[in-house]
Image (cartoon, helix red, strand yellow):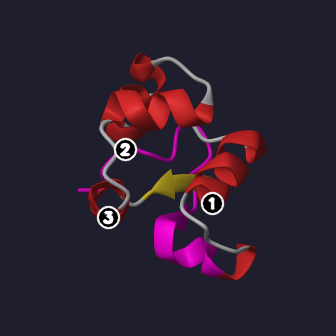
């Protein structure tokens, strides 16, 4: 399983907390490029980052589904379109 961030929800939360990407990066103690990479899907989410995001926005573990999606990954070679 792959954990994917719901970008729209993250952006809404950032607006509610009056945080820019730079402000969020500072709170999470990461570089702004890390936030951009997470948002565009080129960087995965580890347990530490998930916990930091939940804590930053005062979300509990029960709120996980509000901010993240569990996405099944196909084994290598099974990602080709069937005609």
Number of the label disc, if any, that sits on residue 71:
none
- Whether residue 65 is situated above or below residue 39 in the rendered picture: below
* Percent x, y of residue 46: 70, 40
Q: Which residue is mark 3?
A: 16
- Residue 81, magenta (yes or no): yes
From this viewpoint, which residue is outermost toward the front?
18
Question: Residue at coordinates 26% horizontally, 57% vertically from top-left?
Answer: 15
Tell me if residue 58 can be seen: yes
Q: Which residue is mark 2?
A: 80
Answer few, some or many: residues within 10 Å of disc 1's Cα (few below 14, many 20 plus, some between 14 and 19): some
- Residue 60, magenta (yes or no): no
Q: Is residue 83 left or right of residue 78?
A: left
Q: Nearer the viewer, mark 3 or mark 1?
A: 3
Q: Which region is colored magenta?
A: 63-83
Q: Gap between marks 1 and 2, in whole Å?
A: 35 Å
- Whether residue 29 is situated above or below residue 45 in the rendered picture: above
Residue 42 image-quadrant placement: top left
């Amino acid at each position: 399983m792959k954990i994917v961030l719901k970008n729209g929800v993250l952006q809404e939360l950032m607006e509610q907390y009056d945080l820019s990407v730079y402000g969020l990066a500072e709170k999470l103690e990461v570089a702004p490029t890390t936030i951009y990479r997470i948002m565009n899907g080129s960087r995965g989410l580890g347990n530490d980052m998930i916990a930091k995001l939940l804590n930053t926005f005062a979300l509990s573990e029960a709120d996980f589904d509000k901010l993240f999606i569990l996405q099944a990954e196909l084994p290598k070679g099974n990602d080709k379109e069937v005609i």
